[in-house]
Every structure is written in structure tokens, then in C-alpha cells.
Image (cartoon, rainbow, N blue to C red):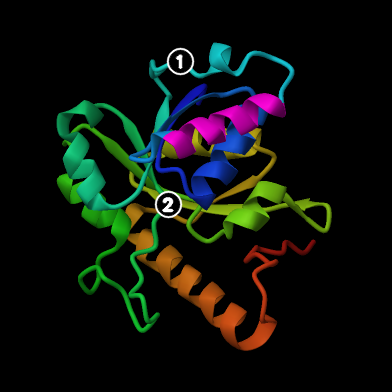
Amino acid sequence: MSTISIIGSGGMAAAIGGLAAKAGHAVEVMSRDAAKARALAAGWSRRDDRDFRRRSGRGHCHSGGSLFGRSDVVKQYGEKLAGKLIIDITNPIKSDFTGFLTPEESSGAQEIAKVAPANATIVKAFNTQNAQVLAAGLVGGDPLDVFIAGDDSQAKLCVSAFIDSLGLRPMDTGRLTMARTLEHACMLWLGLMAHSIKHTNFSIRASLFG
């Protein structure tokens, strides 16, 4: 994935975009807060000796991806997303953490799939990671796990290659219906943070034995 477009300028946009720019991907930031988007791009440029603008074109290669937020954002862009690979990083969790905003048995990714153009491809990824930890990239010298889910095997291979290029470890969990489980994993993370670990400097990962 040589070109990505990130909609938003929050912590996750900064973390993913920063890692992508460092890895040599072209990064485009689109945000309602233009000043914040420019500040993100400038920050990435200062960390790289090369001209950031040389890597921040607006075109999308065949394997280009977009990192989107809520389904209403996908509705806003409509047919402009036709043929695009959309990576859903959202966690549609209620503000009081008592449940989800999506219908029962659905997920943020599945709701996005309902409103996206028919020939867009949806992959769930990055939603189980904290932005601060994600920006660091390693935990105890080991790469962070990024769990993904999707129905298109080629799209998942593309997203996996992108994740690997960031120095992270892609972990395929299956079809897009698994996005709901990944969103529950974020709820698990929140529970651990609130009741056990008491800080945000940790991640959920798979430990492989043997």
C-alpha cells in the first residue's frame, strides 16, 4: 500500500500516519481542522530528511487504502470511495462504556459496509491499539499485533503488507463478521485499563509458544 488517505487528525491519525510516512508511504490527511492536518504533516516532515510533499500526493495506487471513521463519513464521501480499500479503525462504543452503538450482531465495520459503494472493500484493523502505544511500535522489543478482519482475501493481504511495513505484526482473524469480536476486544482493553492495569501503556497481543 504505497498511498493512504487518512480522514481525521486525532491521535490514531497521528500514530498511523506517522508510522506510514516514516516507512516511505505517501500520506494524505483530510480533516475538518485544516490547521491540525497541516501540523501533522509538518511534524512528519521534520522527522524525515526527505521532502514530505514528494510522498504526499493525492493519487491512489491499486493497493491504496483509506483510513476512515464513522459510517456517516463514508456516506459523506459516497461514490468517491468507489473501488477503494477502506480500513475501519473505529470502536462504536457508548460513552458510558456499557455497550455498543451498533445494532446487535453487527459492528462498526459492517455498518460502514452497508453505506459504502458496492465495489469498495472494507477491512477492520488497528482498533485494538492505543494511539500512544501504536506510535511507539514495539512492546518489550516485540512488534505490536494488529488484528484484522475482512471478506476479501486479497484486500487483507494488502492491509497485512502495509501493517508489516510499519514494523507491526498483522494477525488475520477471519471474515468481516469478526469485526464485532475485535470491537469487543477494545471493550476488554478498556476494562483492563480501568480496573486492573490502571494506565494505557499496554496492548493486547497473541503469544506464540513452540
Q: Position of residue 132 (x, y in %)?
A: 64, 56
Residue under the image location 45 percent in, 15 percent down:
57
Mark 1 is on which residue type?
Gly
On screen, residue 81 versus residue 11, left or right, reads left
First along the sequence among labels 1 and 2: 1
Residue under the image location 65 percent in, 63 percent down:
205
Can you say whether 138 is above or below 100 in the image? above
Q: Is residue 116 visible from the viewing direction of this image?
A: no
Residue under label 2: 89
The CA distance from mark 1 to mark 2 is: 23 Å
Q: What quarter of the picture does the C terminus occupy?
A: bottom right
Q: Is residue 200 visible from the viewing direction of this image?
A: yes
Residue under label 1: 57
Q: Callout 1: few (<14), some (14-19), or many (20+) C-alpha neighbours within 10 Å?
A: some
Label 1 sits on a secondary structure element that is loop
On screen, residue 207 versus residue 7, left or right, reads right
Q: Position of residue 64 (x, y in %)?
A: 42, 25
Q: Is residue 55 magenta?
A: no
**Depth order, front residue of 20/113:** 20
- Quarter-of-image position of residue 81: top left
Q: Is residue 45 magenta?
A: yes
Mark 2 is on which residue type?
Ile
The circle on residue 3 is none
Q: What stretch of residues is rendered in magenta?
A: 35-47
Closer mark to the observer between disc 1 and disc 2: 1
Q: Position of residue 107 (x, y in %)?
A: 29, 63
